[in-house]
Amino acid sequence: MNLQKIYEEKKKDLEQIERELARSIQTDHETLQMTSTHLLEAGGKRMRPVFVLLAGSFGSYELKRLQKVAVSLELIHMATLVHDDVIDNAATRRGRKTVKEEWDNRIAMYTGDYILARALKELTDLPNHHLQETLATALMRMCLGEIAQIQDLFSEQQSLKKYLRRIKRKTALLMAVSCQLGALVSGVKPAWERALTAYGYYVGMAFQLTDDVLDFVGDEKTLGKPAGSDLQQGNVTLPVIYALHQGSEECKRSILAYLRSKGESGSLSEILEMIRKSGGIEYTMDLTRRYMDKAFACLKKLPATPERESLKLIAEFILRRSY
């Protein structure tokens, strides 16, 4: 089963959100209009809007309010991707050229800033101080995560604890907040809101862990970016950390030489193969399943509805996804 099938329950509402996403970034400035819609037109999983809608279904479901939150969160996600591509010097995203590659770094940075500003403007229509404070806090923590990732580029001083804190801030927070804000804006019962927020966090952790595995085992055409992109850019993910601690001596020496030379020493393809054989992929996927078990436990605290089943199916999709 693919995501489109899972999303069928909210198809019409998601189509409305897609229209609102396009509307929200409309501008008379020709270049900014092209750059802002560049990533939007490439599509995406739209997991954050889906989490907003599904979480909101456990309370007083009102699309007008929920779509404001959904659009805001998806725009924030898009803005971070545009900025990330500049930092990572990435040439492709979702199978097409990145904004920085199609135009340049300066235009990409201001495009990301513009999309972020539009995201925050969407929320101003909802006079809920707690809603805005929750999102602002999440954004600050996300920035801390991005700074930590930059500081750790090509660093051999990595640990499981540091890695998990980094991906929590980088990915899991925004997914948790998507569930939380969808629940808040719909007046969901506090106990259910806590369960939904925790579910979003655990799924977000599992999503990033799976993403880091796919960077080693995924198909370039399917992923829309070359295999090994993370390590090539200096981003040391869990499979690499595991290989550094548990891999063969040859594997450890090769990875350390690669990191210390900032990617100038050794064959990346050979290093990737050694990491694949180290057991790091299996270790990372085992941790992914443990996070998913926690997510499933959170869902059991919610009433049995079609929306709860959709949340379960999304989690199951993440476990076996190939893109």
Image (spheres, rainbow, N blue to C red):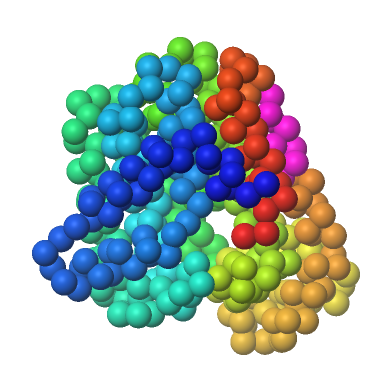
Can see residue 177? no
Can see residue 281? yes
Report the residue at 55% width, 70% height from top. 224
Relative placement, left or right, of 99 versus 177 is: left
- Is residue 291 shown above or below 18? above
Relative placement, left or right, of 112 versus 77 is: left
Report the residue at 47% width, 27% height from top. 55
Q: Can you give x and y, in whole percent of width and height, for residue 301 in the image?
A: 62, 16
- Is residue 82 shown above or below 320? below
Q: Can you give x and y, in whole percent of width and height, for residue 156 in the image?
A: 66, 66
Q: Can you give x and y, in whole percent of width and height, for residue 294 in the image?
A: 69, 30
The overriding secondary structure of the stretch rendered in magenta is helix
Instruction: Specify the quadrant that holds the C terminus.
Output: bottom right
* Magenta-colored stretch includes residue 290: yes
The part of the chain drawn in magenta is 288-297
State which quadrant residue 295 falls in: top right
- Is residue 81 shown above or below 307? below
